[in-house]
Image (cartoon, rainbow, N blue to C red):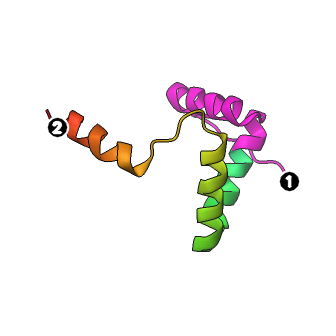
Amino acid sequence: MNITLKEIPDELHQKLRQRAETHGRSLNKEVLSILEMTVNPVRKSSQDLLRQISDRRDKMAHVVKDEELKGIIEEGRL
């Protein structure tokens, strides 16, 4: 099935293209992904979300530890 979108504002089109590039998808695949997530949202369990957060932290170059966080917050309040 095909759908044609008309009169997409230039700014929205550019944001969609940037988002598609960020996710390594074509513009069409990105729009389909957005529609799918909107129409059929996937509900993840709290365990799945915590596992996903942990996986992402493991991939980060620097993770702010809890003891560092308090100091960072206080510095921002000066």
The residue lying at 51 percent from left, 27 percent from top is: 11
The residue lying at 37 percent from left, 48 percent from top is: 67
**What separation in Å lies between label 2 and label 1 (alpha carbons)?**
55 Å
Residue situated in front as seen by the camera: 53 or 28: 53
| Image coords of residue 17 (percent x, y) | 65, 29
Residue 41 is marked as: none
Crowd band around label 1 with a 10 angstrom C-alpha radius: few (<14), some (14–19), many (20+): few
Res. 68 in view: yes
Q: Does dot 2 land on a helix, a strand or a loop? A: loop
Residue situated in front as seen by the camera: 35 or 68: 68
Residue situated in front as seen by the camera: 40 or 42: 42
Quick one: which residue is furthest to the front in this view? 67
The residue lying at 21 percent from left, 40 percent from top is: 74
Residue 1 is marked as: 1
Res. 43 in view: no
Cβ atoms at labels 2 and 1 below 8 Å apart:
no
Residue situated in front as seen by the camera: 74 or 28: 74
Main SS of the magenta part reads helix
| Image coords of residue 73 (percent x, y) | 26, 42
Counting every numbered tag in the picture gives 2
Q: Amino acid at mark 1?
A: Met
Q: Quadrant of residue 5?
A: top right
Q: Does dot 1 land on a helix, a strand or a loop? A: loop
Residue, disc 2: 77
Which region is colored magenta? 1-30
Q: Quadrant of residue 78?
A: top left
Q: Is residue 21 magenta?
A: yes
Q: Amino acid at mark 2?
A: Arg
| Image coords of residue 57 (percent x, y) | 59, 47
Q: Nearer the viewer, mark 2 or mark 1?
A: 2
The tag earlier along the polypeptide, 2 or 1, is 1
| Image coords of residue 32 (percent x, y) | 73, 49
